[in-house]
Amino acid sequence: MAKKVTQNKQDEEVLLDVTGGLTRAEQWFNQNKKILGTVGGSVVGLVALYLAYQNFYQAPREREALDAIAYAEIMFEKDSLDVALNGRGDRLGLIDVSETYSGTKAGNLAHYYAGIAYLQNGAFEDAIKQLDQFKPGDAVMKTVRNGAIGDAFHELGQPKEALDYYQKAAASGKEGYLTPFYLKKAGLTAEMLGDYSGAKRHYERIQKEYPKSNEGTDISKFLARIEGLTTK
């Protein structure tokens, strides 16, 4: 019986401990509920502002940007690169679209088109600036962006920078067409710089991973050349 009384006493103590804990929690909540309410209200307010921004500001801008870039894209496809870049009349060019609609998908894409247009026009520094601002949405576009920057640096007579971007292009993904293409460019540029071991590494990767690609069909000739250069 004494044992039972002792057990009941322990249960009461445990209950008191738990009750006390709840009471302390309730006291803390009551003391800080104003702050908690403010924090909660802030979160709700931020979410509301974000949704309003997306629905009433960003979404209409996205539509406007798509309409604005359409003319420039048509001019780009027609190789009317100056018009594509600078626009005509009340039609915006790629530069204006990228600036006016910064933060939109079309504004971002305008940087890519502008970079390629400048590259084709021979304005290589401008091409690099535009392409550097383009944020690719997938591995393929990342590969193309990096490869185009490499081409611009190559045309500027900066092979070290070109090699860096060709290597970035080759590492952007494992796409069966673009990757060996830029691996070969990286190999040739490495050769130009006298980095024969680097060139050999790029050529060997083509031979091993992309033997059926256009670059892979005659890559043995390039490897043989490297072998001849390193054994002299």
Image (tube, grey):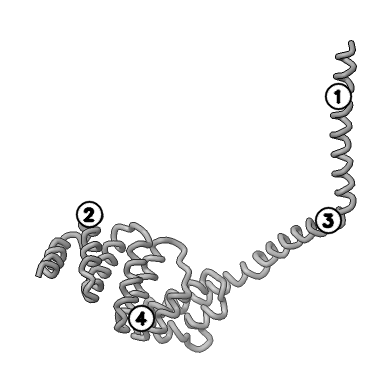
- Whichever of labels 1 and 3 marks the residue nearer the N terminus, that label is 1
Which numbered marker is on residue 37? Answer: 3
- Of residue 145 and residue 83, the one placed in the foreground of this image is 145
- Whichever of labels 2 and 4 marks the residue nearer the N terminus, that label is 4
- Whichever of labels 1 and 2 marks the residue nearer the N terminus, that label is 1
Q: Which residue is mark 1?
A: 10
SS category of the residue bearing label 3 = helix
Closer mark to the observer between disc 1 and disc 3: 1
Q: What is the spatial separation of the Cα atoms under label 1 and label 2, in whole angstroms?
A: 75 Å
- Contact, mark 3 vs mark 2 (Cβ under 8 Å): no
Would you place residue 13 above or below residue 62 in this image? Answer: above
Q: Residues within 10 Å of mark 4 (few under 14, many from 20)?
A: many
Can you give x and y, in whole percent of width and height, for residue 117 in the image? Answer: 38, 80
Q: Which residue is mark 4?
A: 119
Can you give x and y, in whole percent of width and height, for residue 111 in the image? Answer: 46, 76
Q: Which quadrant is home to the C terminus?
A: bottom left
Identified by mark 1, the residue type is Gln
- Contact, mark 2 vs mark 4 (Cβ under 8 Å): no
